[in-house]
């Protein structure tokens, strides 16, 4: 599995409230609307300029804070394929995987990659190629790789159960 895309680079301790503002957590449910608010408090240009295949590069402790899943889904809905960071908050790491967005831990690549450059990620070879060189990262477990390969946890489970062609049930939020 290979990815090629432009980089959006951010720093350390980017929390889930900055990735997806908490004020929208229970009021915005449409994927297109969720995508419009991705990183709006950190980078007001991100949501309107992100393109499918783009990748995020973050520092230490990416995705710390609340466990809200919207911090992962908003990135997925903007087309982000991978987040490369020095380290991840545990729950956010798993939320990314469960939504089919690849979390990669590779501190040396984070230090080398520049904002706006185009990079290549090869999950099978466990490498990141950027302007300054190639970097190896630890492979994902076979289970995590399978979840990502099928597009997320729900898709993987639906495939295993043979229900991937059935429509997803509509989920209503709030007091409806």
Image (tube, rainbow, N blue to C red):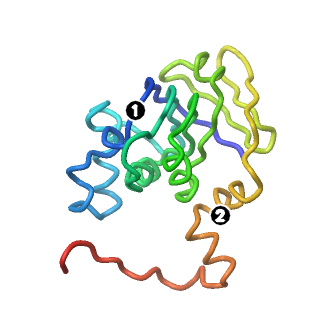
Assess disc 1: are there few (<14), some (14-19) or many (≥20) residues with their C-alpha within 10 Å of its C-alpha.
many
**In the image, residue 146 above or below residue 96:** below
Tell me what residue is drawn at x 46 percent, y 29 percent. Answer: 8
Q: CA distance from mark 1 to mark 2?
A: 27 Å
Residue 112 in the image, given as x and y percentages of width and height: 61, 16
Q: Are marks 1 and 2 in contact (CB under 8 Å)?
A: no
Q: Please give left or right for residue 127 compared with residue 81 in the image.
A: right
**Quadrant (top left, top right, bottom left, bottom right) of the C terminus:** bottom left
Tell me what residue is drawn at x 34 percent, y 51 percent. Answer: 35
Assess disc 2: are there few (<14), some (14-19) or many (≥20) residues with their C-alpha within 10 Å of its C-alpha.
some
As rendered, which of 149 and 20 lies closer to the eye? 20
- The residue wearing badge 1 is 14
Q: Please give left or right for residue 29 compared with residue 95 in the image.
A: left
Count of number-bearing discs: 2
Q: Quadrant of residue 87?
A: top right
Residue 23 in the image, given as x and y percentages of width and height: 20, 50
Q: Please give left or right for residue 63 compared with residue 156 in the image.
A: left
As rendered, which of 100 and 93 lies closer to the eye? 93
**In the image, residue 99 above or below residue 47:** below
Pair 1/2: label in front: 1
Tell me what residue is drawn at x 60 percent, y 79 percent. Answer: 164
Tell me what residue is drawn at x 56 percent, y 31 percent. Answer: 85
Q: Secondary structure at mark 1?
A: loop
Q: Mark number for residue 28?
A: none
> Which badge, 1 or 2, is on the more N-terminal residue?
1
Q: Mark number for residue 150?
A: 2
Residue 168 in the image, given as x and y percentages of width and height: 46, 80
Residue 5 in the image, given as x and y percentages of width and height: 57, 35
Q: Secondary structure at mark 2?
A: loop
């Amino acid at each position: 599995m290979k990815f090629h895309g432009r980089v959006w680079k951010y720093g350390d301790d980017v929390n889930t409230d900055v990735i997806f503002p908490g004020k929208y957590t229970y009021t915005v449910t449409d994927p297109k609307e969720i995508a419009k608010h991705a990183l709006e408090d950190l980078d007001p240009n991100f949501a309107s300029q992100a393109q499918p295949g783009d990748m995020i590069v973050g520092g230490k402790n990416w995705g710390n804070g609340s466990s809200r899943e919207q911090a992962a889904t908003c990135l997925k809905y903007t087309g982000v394929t991978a987040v490369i960071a020095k380290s991840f908050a545990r729950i956010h790491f798993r939320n990314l995987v469960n939504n089919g967005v690849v979390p990669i831990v590779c501190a040396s690549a984070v230090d080398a990659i520049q904002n706006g450059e185009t990079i290549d990620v090869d999950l099978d070879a466990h490498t990141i190629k950027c302007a300054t060189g190639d970097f190896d990262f630890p492979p994902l477990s076979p289970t995590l790789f399978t979840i990502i390969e099928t597009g997320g946890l729900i898709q993987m489970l639906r495939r295993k159960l043979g229900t991937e062609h059935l429509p997803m049930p509509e989920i209503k939020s709030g007091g409806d």
